[in-house]
Image (cartoon, coloured by chain):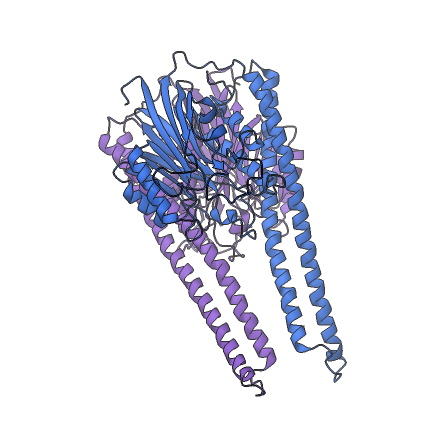
Chain colours: A blue, B purple
Amino acid sequence: MANTDSLRVRVFSLNCWGIRYVSKHTPQRYDMIGELLSKEEYDIVLLQEVWSEKDYLSLKKKLAFCHPHSHHFKSGVIGSGLAIFSKHRIHDTFLYRYSLNGYPYMVQHGDWFGGKAVGMAVLKLGGLTANVYVTHLHAEYSRDKDSYLPHRVVQAWELQQFVRHTSAAADVVILGGDLNMHPQDLGSRLLMSYTGLRDSYLESAEFDGCEDGMTLIADNPFIGKGSMGPLEKGIRIDYILFKGSSEKDVHCDFMSTTKGSAPDHPFPYSDHEALTAALRVETRQRPSKNQGSAGGKTAELVDIVTEARTEVKVGLHCAERMRYTAARTGAMGLALLFLELAIAAVPWLALGAAQPFPRTSFYLLAALCVAILFTTALLYVFYSAELKSLQGAEDQMRLAVGSLQEELRGFPVAQPHGAQRGALGPEE
Amino acid sequence: MANTDSLRVRVFSLNCWGIRYVSKHTPQRYDMIGELLSKEEYDIVLLQEVWSEKDYLSLKKKLAFCHPHSHHFKSGVIGSGLAIFSKHRIHDTFLYRYSLNGYPYMVQHGDWFGGKAVGMAVLKLGGLTANVYVTHLHAEYSRDKDSYLPHRVVQAWELQQFVRHTSAAADVVILGGDLNMHPQDLGSRLLMSYTGLRDSYLESAEFDGCEDGMTLIADNPFIGKGSMGPLEKGIRIDYILFKGSSEKDVHCDFMSTTKGSAPDHPFPYSDHEALTAALRVETRQRPSKNQGSAGGKTAELVDIVTEARTEVKVGLHCAERMRYTAARTGAMGLALLFLELAIAAVPWLALGAAQPFPRTSFYLLAALCVAILFTTALLYVFYSAELKSLQGAEDQMRLAVGSLQEELRGFPVAQPHGAQRGALGPEE
């Protein structure tokens, strides 16, 4: 494999929907997934929502013969749910936890507890260094009124930063996962433009799968009927992305998705469709040009980052309002407590007068006030941290726009600086 | 500067101890720091414990003429306290938040609220790309009984990962900050061996400053008398570290620290001493050898990572015990609540019997039980997240040791893989 002119890499990605006792038919579906992976023997398997360590370990055992190398990325309270299985030795791993990930009190959405992150594994494919990333961004629960949008934009921002800054030494970069973003969403554009990653669905010479490459389809029996909207057949939110380097070029020969069912089984592998991509790595005939049309790309990037900044500012405004509300509610709780104590104190001070405050009500009201104070204090701290993260991202974006604009002004004299080498420059 | 054969870079690092209303003489000290920086015009200024945004902004204003580029890294509830001021344009920034950072209930230590992190800035120095890192690790409150050691070891692990994986495209790497580790501590060895970073105090051709390069000294008037122990004059826990690349070599010509006082001022700049290093970047006459004695370095690294794994396992054991204690205390709170309800229910069921439970005690006891339940639930969640992070670091270390051992076995046939290029290989 390493000695031929081109290197072939088969990549698999699936959101396993592995919430024990909540997701449907979890054990049977893991069996099916294990069976599929044993049969297909992909080079690299990227899984999301493998929440349970036990499920990961049983997969690991089952796949030991074909995927002797694996890693389960741990973070948050429950875990990141991210796992990688590989035919090739994993030399190094690294995990980046996103700074924002929803709200702990949105228990029904549960994202906060998952500790969303992006995991990286450094593999050797033949003689080449491959940086493989697996990630899962915050879910979108409502397209029209998506209150998590600023969080997801910041996650996309941090994802592109992580990929861009850690992949300079890699010959091949592969990213797979559930981005929870449509192809034209701000976060997708931010990720693809800044890193230079290419979408295997769009780049593939051949495709077999759901219409428009959709990965969350209305026909999947695990998807609630009607949850997609009456007209929508599905959405494309899972991706396998890739790029080469100045010396290596990567092509996608074939890409496929499952189609809402698994052959010879009563139900599909998951509520998401599985993705596979057959990539081919080749040595570039001539090293990639460093300048080319990069000016146009930089200008586009300035627009996208500016759009992202606006979205983050909306998030900042919301977080500030929420923190203010928490502070005001807390202050009212405190005032109520003082008022109650004052009312109770008056007859006590006017010695001997009858206590007008029924004892039960007194204690209940006091407990309520203390509960309000405690909760609002926690919320205040939480929103303060959210504000810090949003402000941090906004600062970084402002700085990046400044640097990109300078690059644009100085174009083509200024070289793209090191960390962006191969990212801003065109791939061919 | 860029056109001469060698490039000179002057770096400054200081833990500013900038806790408003708590640290002594904060406004005066910031004035002094601003004055010093305006006068000295260092290329790169790395500050820690700049907790207040206002103090950062006032410094920014004061230094605008000599350091037009700056960034304040934001994270956690209060912030990361990390700031960078630069003569040269900052092209890009990135922040990595450590997964572990003490305990929120250790309010008197406060580290948890600070959101400890490592900040990175990509600068252009002449035509070279410099990756500059600033960080502040968890404080050590007791050397003999350091309950935060596993947290600090995991922070050092994550710091070396971050530097190693993000610096592949850099010609020059500079790291400054308060590591809260002595030079021979496990975390220091882990950081230096894995990244190949060199200590400017040890490497400097000339040194002027405190004995043994100490940066926290007993003679500093802000240090509590006796807090250093009776025999100790001070410790060295602040550093400026650097390395070059396969093409660039970095030398330290001069290094200095302040000596517990500031000229013409009644008190020093901070409770820590300030560090300055004069670095010189030169093009290597011959590209750095890739193999050399790297075998010995790899073997040493295996030992260090194994030692770190042991320390993390101790942390895991402690966190498991703490989580168990939280669960048991919670269960006892619940049992007490049920018992109380049962005692209260008996006479209520035996209609008409007198209520034997005084109402006040009943409510107080119930409130106590609920408070116990709530607190232990929060602690359980917190310890679960701590366990996940420790397990994650342990997994990564195990995997790294495996990969290093394979490299050692295959030595010198196997090439060091991309991400470690220039890290494991010797500098000269």
Nearer to us in this view, B131 or A320: A320
Residue shown at 38% from the left, 33% from the top: A12
Q: Position of residue A52 (x, y in %)?
A: 39, 49
- Give the number of marks: 0
Q: Is residue A345 above or below residue A34?
A: below
Q: Which quadrant holds residue A278?
A: top left
| A31 sits left or right of B385 in the view | left
**Residue A176 visible:** yes
Q: Position of residue A82 (x, y in %)?
A: 41, 41
Q: Position of residue A136 (x, y in %)?
A: 47, 39
Q: Position of residue A96 (x, y in %)?
A: 46, 39
Residue shown at 38% from the left, 53% from the top: B315
Residue shown at 56% from the left, 13% from the top: A412
In the picture as drawn, the residue positioned furthest to the bottom comes out as: B353
Q: Which quadrant holds residue B241?
A: top left
Quadrant, the N terminus of chain A: top left
Q: Which quadrant holds residue A261?
A: top left
In the picture as drawn, the residue positioned furthest to the left comes out as: B409
Q: Is residue B346 above or below residue A235?
A: below
**Residue B397 visible:** no
Nearer to us in this view, A357 or A13: A13
